Structure formats: C-alpha cells, structure tokens
C-alpha cells in the first residue's frame, strides 16, 4: 500500500471516532503496527490532520488519535 493511500485509510477510519494505532492496524487487516503505518501517523501528526487524545503522554497505552477539527 502506498504511503498516501495508507494516510487516506487512516483518515477515513478516524471519521468514525478516536482509535488507537493498534485498533487502526487491525481494521486495515494487519496483525502488528507496520513501519508504513508509523510513518503515516507521523506524517498526519506533522501536518496536523490528526491529534492525540492525550498529548501530554504521547507514549501512553491509552493513547488514541482523532481528526483535527
């Protein structure tokens, strides 16, 4: 899957509401969080298209991501 299409898939999934990286990975049919998915998250965060639900704890196991309004 191309990085751009992976970013679009992530954005489409987040339209339903906040999700964790692992939840998104499972929705995409992956068993684990791939390197490509990590890159897509980093790019979307950098572009401020998505935000973290717990920004003060970026590595929290409870971290979710949602669309930036």
Image: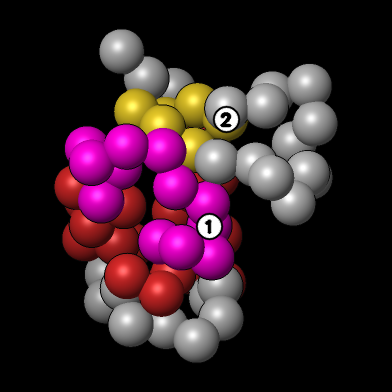
Visible residue check, residue 36: yes
Magenta part of the chain: 13-24
Within 10 Å of disc 2 (Cα), the crowding (few <14, some 14-19, many 20+) is some
Cα gap from disc 1 to disc 2, whole angstroms: 11 Å
Visible residue check, residue 39: no
Q: 50 above or below 13?
A: above
Residue at image location 54% in from the left, 65% down from the top: 22
Residue 26, how many percent across, how many down? 41, 74
Residue 24, how many percent across, how many down? 41, 61
Residue 53, how many percent across, how many down? 58, 27
Q: Per the image, is 49 magenta?
A: no
Image disc number at residue 52: 2
- Image quadrant in which the C terminus is located: top left
Q: Quadrant of residue 33?
A: bottom right
Query: What secondary structure is found at the residue carrying circle 2?
Result: strand
Query: What secondary structure is found at the residue carrying circle 1?
Result: helix
Tell me the residue that label 1 is attached to: 21
Q: 1 above or below 62?
A: below
| Horizontal arrangement in the rendering, residue 69 relative to residue 8 (left or right) | right
Q: Per the image, is 19 magenta?
A: yes
Within 10 Å of disc 1 (Cα), the crowding (few <14, some 14-19, many 20+) is many
Residue at image location 65% in from the left, 42% down from the top: 63
């Amino acid at each position: 899957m191309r990085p751009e299409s992976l970013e679009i898939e992530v954005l489409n999934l987040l339209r339903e509401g906040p999700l964790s990286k692992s939840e998104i990975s499972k929705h995409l049919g992956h068993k684990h969080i791939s390197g490509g998915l990590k890159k897509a998250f980093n790019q979307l965060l950098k572009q401020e298209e998505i935000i973290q639900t717990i920004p003060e704890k970026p590595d929290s196991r409870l971290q979710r991501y949602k669309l930036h309004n």
